[in-house]
Image (spheres, rainbow, N blue to C red):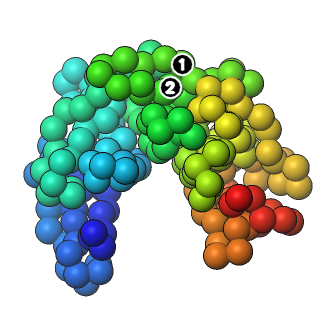
């Protein structure tokens, strides 16, 4: 709907209805917000750290104005949620300090780390336009999955010092960009098919 969301380290989230010129505080407890995902139904899911007992996801059904505790505890739950995003199957992927999990709905979770090295966590998920492939920017490079469960490495050309990937984005031509701790890298061919 054009709103801009901003997550903070200690004060939850803020929302702007004017393209980022001004922000107001959302009705969210004092979580650290690490990532947002807007689901196809319009719900805003925030990957968070904090709460007692710890919460991993909070959900807003009013475009980010108010939030409630959401999806329960994922099987790999450890410390905080680093990334939240879509899978090619229409489910939700979540990465905590303990690994990647898939939310199947109605409080049901399963681990989703097939093909990933032990202790790898994702910092970002991005789905291609066709909705057939999800890319994960991880602490060990870029991986992709066609089912949200099984992953394949996709880091050819990334130097070893750039294997910690914090963000992913596609440009208008479909090239995938990886924001790493060592700079910005771009694929040599379009990937958004």
Is residue 9 positioned above or below 145 on the image?
below
Residue under label 2: 101
Give how far across and how far down residue 69 sits, in percent: 19, 33
Camera-nearest residue between 163 and 111: 111
Image quarter of residue 149: top right
Give how far across and how far down residue 38 sits, in percent: 36, 53
Q: Name the residue located 57 percent from the left edge and 40 percent from the top edge.
A: 88
On the picture, is 73 further left or further right than 82?
left
Give how far across and how far down residue 16 sits, in percent: 22, 72
Report helix, strand or loop for mark 1: strand
Query: Most extreme residue toward the front, as rendered?
Result: 130
Q: Which mark is residue 36?
A: none
Give how far across and how far down residue 185 sits, in percent: 76, 64
Camera-nearest residue between 6 and 173: 173
Are there few (<14), some (14-19), or many (20+) residues within 10 Å of tag 2? many
Are there few (<14), some (14-19), or many (20+) residues within 10 Å of tag 1? some
Q: Name the residue located 35 percent from the left edge and 26 percent from the top edge.
A: 105
Report helix, strand or loop for mark 2: strand
On the picture, is 66 further left or further right than 126?
left
Camera-nearest residue between 40 and 163: 40
Is residue 123 positioned above or below 75 on the image?
below
For marks 1 and 2, give the CA distance: 4 Å
State if disc 2 and disc 1 touch (CB < 8 Å): yes
Q: Is residue 168 shown to the viewer in this render?
A: yes
Q: Is residue 98 shown to the viewer in this render?
A: no
Residue under label 1: 111
Is residue 73 positioned above or below 135 on the image?
above
Image quarter of residue 144: top right
Q: Earlier in the sequence, mark 1 or mark 2?
A: 2
Q: Name the residue located 74 percent from the left edge and 24 percent from the top edge.
A: 115
Q: Quadrant of the C terminus?
A: bottom right
């Amino acid at each position: 709907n054009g709103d801009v969301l901003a997550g903070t380290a200690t004060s939850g989230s803020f929302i702007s209805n004017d393209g980022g010129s001004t922000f107001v505080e959302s009705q969210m407890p004092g979580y650290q917000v690490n990532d947002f995902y807007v689901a196809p139904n319009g719900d805003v899911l925030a990957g968070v750290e904090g709460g007692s007992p710890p919460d991993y996801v909070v959900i807003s059904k009013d475009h980010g104005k108010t939030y409630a505790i959401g999806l329960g505890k994922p099987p790999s739950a450890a410390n905080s949620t680093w990334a939240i995003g879509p899978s090619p199957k229409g489910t939700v992927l979540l990465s905590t300090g303990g690994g990647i999990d898939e939310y199947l709905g109605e409080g049901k979770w399963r681990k989703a780390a097939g093909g990933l090295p032990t202790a790898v966590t994702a910092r970002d998920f991005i789905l291609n336009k066709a909705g057939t492939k999800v890319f994960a920017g991880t602490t060990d490079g870029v991986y992709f999955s066609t089912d949200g469960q099984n992953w394949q490495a996709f880091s050819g050309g990334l130097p070893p010092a750039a294997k910690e990937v914090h963000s992913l984005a596609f440009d208008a031509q479909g090239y995938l960009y990886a924001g790493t701790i060592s700079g910005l890298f771009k694929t040599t061919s379009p990937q958004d098919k």
